[in-house]
Image: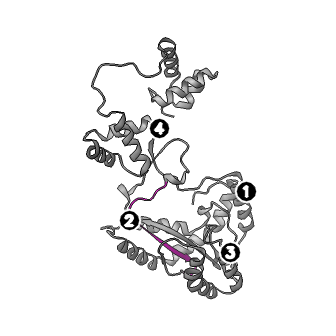
C-alpha cells in the first residue's frame, strides 16, 4: 500500500475517534494508509490545540471556496463517469473560477472520491459460490456433443461513447460493487443474441424496457423456438436469471413448447461464453475507425459484425465450458478468469 503523507479532514476525525477508543497508532495508520508518525502528530496536535485541522500557514490561498468545493463534489456524484477536465470546465462556467484538473482531483480526494475502473464482475456471497460450485460439479463431465446442443443467449448494452477508450468512475472505498456507480455514458443500444457450437441467431435490437411478455413475444417465439428445433430434440436453452427471463409468462410458455431449460447459477457471467463474444464485439467497436456517430450507425455496425462472426470462434467458446467448470471448482466457486 502506498502511504500518504497527510490526511484529509474527514479522516482526521475518524483517526482521533479510533485512538480515543483504544486503537494503536499502527492499527489506525494501517487502516488509513499513512505512517504511524502521521497519526502520532495528529494526536499531539489535538492535545496541544484541541484541533485536528491544519494550522493556518503562509502561501497562496485556495482558489476555491467551500461553495465551489461542494459544486465539484456534486458533479462527480451526479455523473460518476465525468472527467476532471469536464468538471473544471463546468466550474468555470458556473462560478467563473479557473483551476487546474489536478485541483479538481485534489478536492475530490479530500472527500475520499477517487477515479477507479468500474467493477465488471458481480460480488459473490458464500451462497453464490456454493451454487456456482454445485452447478459446475454437475456439468464438469459434459461432453462436447452435449455442450453443442446448448443455445447460449443473453442481452448486452453497447455505449456510443467510450471516453479515451477507458471508462472510469468516481467512487469511495467500499462502493466497488454499488450499481449506481456503474452508470453508462452517452447513448446506448441494447441487443439480444444467441449461439451454439455450429449456428448463431440473428442479433435482435431491444427498444425500451424488456419485459417477460416482450421476451416471450419478440425473442422466444420468433427466434429461439425455431433455433432450438433446428438443433434437435436434445436442444437446451441457456439464459440467466434476470427478471424478464424468469417471469411466469416465460416459464409457462417454455413449458408449453416443451423446451428444456438449463438452470443457471446467479452472478455467473464468467460461465456464459456469450459474454466473451460481447467483449469481442466491444473491442471491435472501440478499434473501429471512424467510430459510429449515431445510435443508428452503432446498431448497424453491431449487426454487421455479428453477422460476420467466425463460427470457429463461437465453437471454441462453447468448447471452453468444461474448462470453465473445472476452474470454478478449483476456485471453490469464486470467479474464473474468463
Looking at the image, is mark 3 or mark 2 nearer the viewer?
A: 3
Dot 4: what SS?
loop
Residues packed near mark 2 inside 10 Å, few (<14), some (14 to 19) or many (20 plus) = many
Residues packed near mark 1 inside 10 Å, few (<14), some (14 to 19) or many (20 plus) = some
Ranked by sequence position, the earlier of labels 2 and 4 is 4
Looking at the image, is mark 1 or mark 2 nearer the viewer?
A: 2
Left or right placement of residue 250 versus residue 5 in this view = right
Badge 3 is on which residue? 248
Ranked by sequence position, the earlier of labels 1 and 2 is 1
Q: Look at 70% across and 54% down and name the residue there.
A: 332
Residue 22 rendering spot, x and y as whole percentages = 64, 21
Image quadrant in which you'd find residue 62: top left
| Above or below, 42 relative to 331 | above
- Whether residue 46 is in magenta: the answer is no
Q: CA distance from mark 1 to mark 2?
A: 37 Å
Q: CA distance from mark 2 to mark 4?
A: 30 Å
Instruction: Say if mark 2 contacts mark 4, CB within 8 Å.
Output: no
Magenta stretch?
A: 182-199
Instruction: Say if mark 1 contacts mark 2, CB within 8 Å.
Output: no
Badge 1 is on which residue? 130
Q: CA distance from mark 4 to mark 3?
A: 44 Å
Badge 4 is on which residue? 112
Ranked by sequence position, the earlier of labels 4 and 1 is 4
Identify which residue, 274 or 253, lies in the foreground. 253
Q: CA distance from mark 3 to mark 1?
A: 26 Å
Q: Which mark is residue 160?
A: 2
Amino acid at each position: 500500500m502506498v502511504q500518504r503523507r497527510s490526511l484529509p479532514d474527514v479522516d482526521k476525525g475518524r483517526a482521533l475517534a479510533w485512538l480515543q477508543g483504544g486503537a494503536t497508532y499502527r492499527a489506525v495508520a494501517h487502516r488509513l494508509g499513512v505512517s504511524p508518525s502521521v497519526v502520532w502528530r495528529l494526536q499531539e496536535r489535538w492535545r496541544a490545540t484541541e484541533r485536528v485541522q491544519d494550522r493556518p500557514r503562509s502561501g497562496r490561498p485556495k482558489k476555491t471556496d467551500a461553495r465551489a468545493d461542494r459544486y465539484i463534489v456534486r458533479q462527480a456524484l451526479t455523473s460518476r463517469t465525468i472527467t476532471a477536465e469536464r468538471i473544471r470546465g463546468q466550474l468555470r462556467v458556473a462560478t467563473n473560477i479557473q483551476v487546474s484538473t489536478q485541483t479538481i482531483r485534489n478536492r475530490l480526494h479530500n472527500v475520499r472520491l477517487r477515479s477507479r475502473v468500474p467493477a465488471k464482475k458481480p460480488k459473490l456471497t458464500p451462497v453464490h459460490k456454493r451454487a456456482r460450485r454445485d452447478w459446475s460439479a454437475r456439468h464438469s463431465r459434459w461432453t462436447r456433443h452435449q455442450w453443442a446442443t446448448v443455445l447460449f443467449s443473453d442481452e448486452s448494452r453497447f455505449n456510443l461513447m467510450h471516453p479515451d477508450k477507458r471508462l472510469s468512475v468516481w467512487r469511495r472505498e467500499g462502493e466497488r460493487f454499488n450499481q449506481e456507480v456503474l452508470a453508462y455514458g452517452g447513448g446506448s443500444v441494447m441487443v439480444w443474441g444467441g449461439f451454439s457450437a455450429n449456428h448463431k441467431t440473428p442479433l435482435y435490437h431491444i427498444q425500451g424496457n424488456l419485459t417477460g411478455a416482450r421476451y416471450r413475444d419478440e425473442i422466444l417465439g420468433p427466434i429461439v423456438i425455431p433455433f432450438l428445433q433446428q438443433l434437435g430434440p436434445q436442444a437446451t436453452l441457456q439464459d440467466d436469471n434476470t427478471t424478464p427471463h424468469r417471469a411466469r409468462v416465460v416459464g409457462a410458455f417454455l413449458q408449453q413448447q416443451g423446451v428444456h431449460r438449463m438452470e443457471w447459477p446467479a452472478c455467473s457471467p464468467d460461465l456464459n461464453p456469450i459474454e466473451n463474444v460481447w467483449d469481442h464485439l466491444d473491442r471491435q467497436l472501440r478499434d473501429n475507425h471512424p467510430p459510429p456517430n449515431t445510435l443508428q450507425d452503432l446498431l448497424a455496425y453491431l449487426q454487421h459484425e455479428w453477422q460476420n462472426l467466425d463460427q470457429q470462434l463461437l465453437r471454441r467458446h462453447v468448447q471452453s465450458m468444461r474448462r470453465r467448470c473445472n476452474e470454478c471448482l478449483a476456485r471453490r466457486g469464486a470467479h474464473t478468469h474468463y
